[in-house]
Image: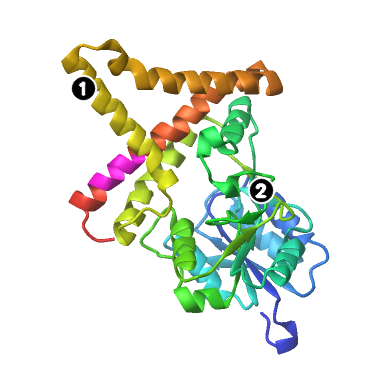
Amino acid sequence: MYNQVSETPLISVIIPCKNEIIHIKKCILSLINQINIPGKIEILVIDGLSTDGTRELLESLSENYKNLRVVNNPKQITPVALNLGIKASRGKYICILGAHAEYTDEFISNSIKLMNEHLEASCVGGPIISKGKTKFGTSAAIAMSSVVGVGNAKHRFPDYEGYAEMACFPVFRREVFDRIGLYDEALIKNQDDELCFRLNRDGGKVFISPLVKSVYYVRDDPVSLFKQYFNYGFWRAAVLKKHKIPISFRQLVPVTFILLVIIFFVIGMLLDVVWILYGLPAIYIGILLIFGAKTLIKFGFRVGVFIPLSIAILHLSYAFGTFSGLIYFNYLQRKI
């Protein structure tokens, strides 16, 4: 516990965590081994009652590293974990990280540097570097870093520097939370997008730079990837209902495309016109195959062959999730 003013940390790192036995040690050590930080760092892991040995490992690490603390999250949901961490933290800056990632040894020092260089920014971070551990995972990582896969999501492009709508692993000035409030605990997913939307609406700015590097390990199989992006789409509908406008029009593209496919299919059936019936799906499949062929040349057959599937999963799961969410939050559950 930091009891003296002189020991108050410069930055508090908050990591929500549940059953991350595979990744958590490397994640923590990558933060313990940070260099060139102009002050003290505290690391708070908010554990959602892990049952796979994660909690025991964290307790063991905290005995060796006194700036590591473990906080209970009995509700086991991410926005609650984030708010528990913010309330328990003492740093001038609040850094929100993921247990499913690793961070370069100057991640924090470069984040502080960006804060000092961009006084207009309320939040800084770095574009995420996605990686997979299997051939499919590698293809999914490529899809998540491409315009074809994620549109103009600047925080997904590893070399982007400039203003963005959000940062994947952000560092906030502490006063941001006093000004715009904490994470919305009603949002199981997309609470980070929604908070950054409130930040931008309040006049705050997010600046990201590839100087701040982190590696995020993507889902390594089609089913897990589908579930992840279905949930993103589902909870996007909750955010849409809350604010009455989309955070980004990019996020409406998958749903709009599916609606157009359905409309054109019905018209094509009624008019018995083949090109209307199959035109849009053919164009879409053609784009995926062309992009897959390009990546096949660069990354090899065993990765490139999965690219069309990975992109289709990103788009379709997100669209179906959004459809489901719109129905659920508008007709089955009224309050959000």
The percent position of residue 259, horizontal first and vertical second, equals 29, 33
Image point (40%, 35%), residue name = 317
Q: Magenta stretch: dominant SS?
A: helix
Residue 100 as seen in the image, left or right of residue 279:
right
Q: Residue at x 43, y 38 (%)?
A: 227
Q: Find residue 243 and report its image quarter.
A: bottom left
Q: Which residue is mark 2?
A: 160
Percent from the top left, x then y, of residue 325? 30, 46
The amino acid on which the numbered mark 1 sits, given as a three-letter code, is Val
Residue closest to the eye, 65 or 137:
137
Q: Which quadrant does the C terminus fall into?
A: bottom left
Is disc 2 surrounded by few (<14), some (14 to 19) or many (20+) residues within 10 Å? Answer: some
Task: Give percent across and percent down for residue 84.
Answer: 50, 70
Q: Residue furthest bottom?
A: 5
Give, as a three-letter code, the residue at label 2: Tyr
Query: What's drawn in magenta, residue-wise?
Result: 321-327
